[in-house]
Image (cartoon, rainbow, N blue to C red):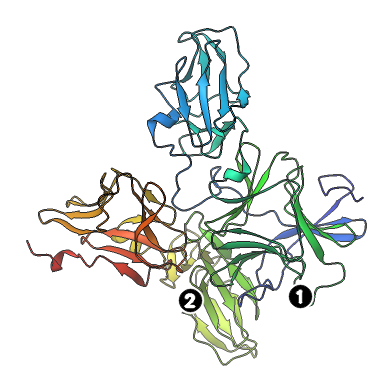
Amino acid sequence: MPAPISSDPGYVSVPLDYRTQGDLDGDGRPELITRHSRYTYGGTLVVVHKGVAPAGGLARFGEATSVGDIQQPVRRVNGHGLVNADVLYSACVSLKVQSDGSAVVTELATGKVLWSSNTPGHPLGSLTMEGTGRLALARHYDDSYWSPPGVAGGGSGTVLSVQDDCNVVLRDGKGAVLWSTRTYDPARELLGTAVPAGTRLANGQEVVAGQVLLKMATSGNLNLIDRQTSRVLWTSGNTPFLPAPPDAGVDGALQPDGNLVIRNKDGNPVWSSGTWGTQGARLVVQSDGNLVIYDADGRPVWSTGTWFGGVDTLGHPLCSGCLLIPYETVESKAGRLVMQQDGNLVLYSKATGNARWSSGTWGHPGATAFMQGDGNLVVRASDGTALWASGTWGRGNARAVLQDDLNLVVYDPAGRALWATGTDNRVAARRGTALFAGAVVKSGEEVHTPITSPIWLQMQSDGNLVLHFNPVGAVWSSRTWGNPGARATVQADGNVVVYAADGRGLWSTGTWGHPGAYLVLQNDANLVLYDADGVQPLWASNTYWKSLKY
């Protein structure tokens, strides 16, 4: 039996820029340009893809969804603390400080104790969140007898959440995980579908989370696919061409050491995530389009960075002297810049698949795109003739960046923008207050515009979603009154839905099939749902202020 791929000295690292062919047409063949390192294992080449580094400890980029209603004071421990005999509940577990001073997490369905601080002999103890963000069990203010090992404190805003996935998690003010009880239940995963360590995906097998599909393809690649459009969001790329070679991968599995590995028919590894050393990790196919490996406490250690919408980093640079030949691609979180075989340089939206910009140079097969040393981005025909240019010459060491907001920008060395495609997908969001995929407006909550005029959206306690504009009053509603406890959510599939407390759908915009769409409460009193590119209105309340009588 071959040994699991790990950081074993028997592996010889060979760093290189490994280019794979890609996927623009959804046929499962990867076109992306990705940076890998490769390892040799018994003569077999192993591709190691390090994935996307978490930003600030977070793997999900976009508007956060609820995880166990942590906004509700009765479900968390903050400055108020949890005194003896008090109990916090989630849908799965309870957290209680017993009369003997031990804090315990108990499964509601079975009464089984899943975790305990094991600190008996301290009657009248309480669980307190100190001002420094340090969680402690104490009998008196300065008489603490337990705190999470190795965690000094998360600072202001630190919260302990009793989650609906059975885990109790300590997070700092930015949401990064500091510690957990490790009582997570994969069957209750909140963000999608969990794949526990040891689960094997053979050729043709798949895992589904909403409109997202993780499949071990017969080509030997592990592919993440948008089920509605059949587009490949991410691929392991270890088999860049079809048909698959004899030593292609035949199954993928998350090992007990936390490493996601693809093996060939002989059992030898041919690809891995490079995340060994994270025992207790889990792989989650998230409904927001991201594939993430979390450690035992819930910290992201690897991800594909393929959520629907959301902006985090600046993007992917096309450096001075870089060349794009036909079929080559540069990607950011929202866009894909392709040097097409017909000679056209085209920027595509990942979320919608639409072409958002092009150089207009089709009809010149074999053309290339080149970021010149003088700062000019140029498309040249196969004979060297310039077909298109950004007009930014004379700026040495300039760089072109495909940003995560879908904009392609040429910057000078000082960071000043010299030229751009003008395809920013957050333009519409700046027309007011935006609610991105996953956002939830709960009963009694309000959303306001950033300007001082009195415009707000309210999820009323009677279940009606109402748009207010003073001095007119209510100008639009979902007409779903009579359903106390209802909530409104912007779904990953682009539909905005009002759900009853029991989960029944009461009203929707009817805009499913538009992943990454976002809702904007505009400064003109109009409520508009835009596609992920921020270009096409999919639905509107038609209440812009000039149409209102007052």
Mark 2 belongs to which amino acid? Asn
Q: Is residue 454 above or below residue 546?
A: above
- Front residue of 164 and 177: 164
- Front residue of 240 and 371: 240
Label 1: few (<14), some (14–19) or many (≥20) C-alpha neighbours in 10 Å: some
Q: How many marks?
A: 2
Q: Is residue 76 above or below residue 409?
A: above
Mark 1 belongs to which amino acid? Phe
Mark 1 or mark 2: name the one nearer the start of the chain: 1
The residue that disc 1 covers is 241
Q: Is residue 90 above or below residue 432?
A: above
Name the residue at the left extreme.
550
Q: CA distance from mark 1 to mark 2?
A: 25 Å
Label 2: few (<14), some (14–19) or many (≥20) C-alpha neighbours in 10 Å: few
Q: Residue 223, percent across and down?
A: 67, 64
Q: Quadrant of the C terminus?
A: bottom left
**Residue 52 quadrant:** bottom right
Q: Residue at x 72, y 70 (%)?
A: 20
**Residue 497 relative to residue 299: left or right:** left
**Residue 288 relative to residue 299: left or right:** left
Q: Residue 431, percent across and down?
A: 29, 61
Q: Residue at x 62, y 25 (%)?
A: 115
The residue that disc 2 covers is 354
Q: Residue at x 59, y 71 (%)?
A: 231
Residue 536's disc is none
- Front residue of 391 and 19: 19
Q: Residue 69, percent across and down?
A: 43, 39
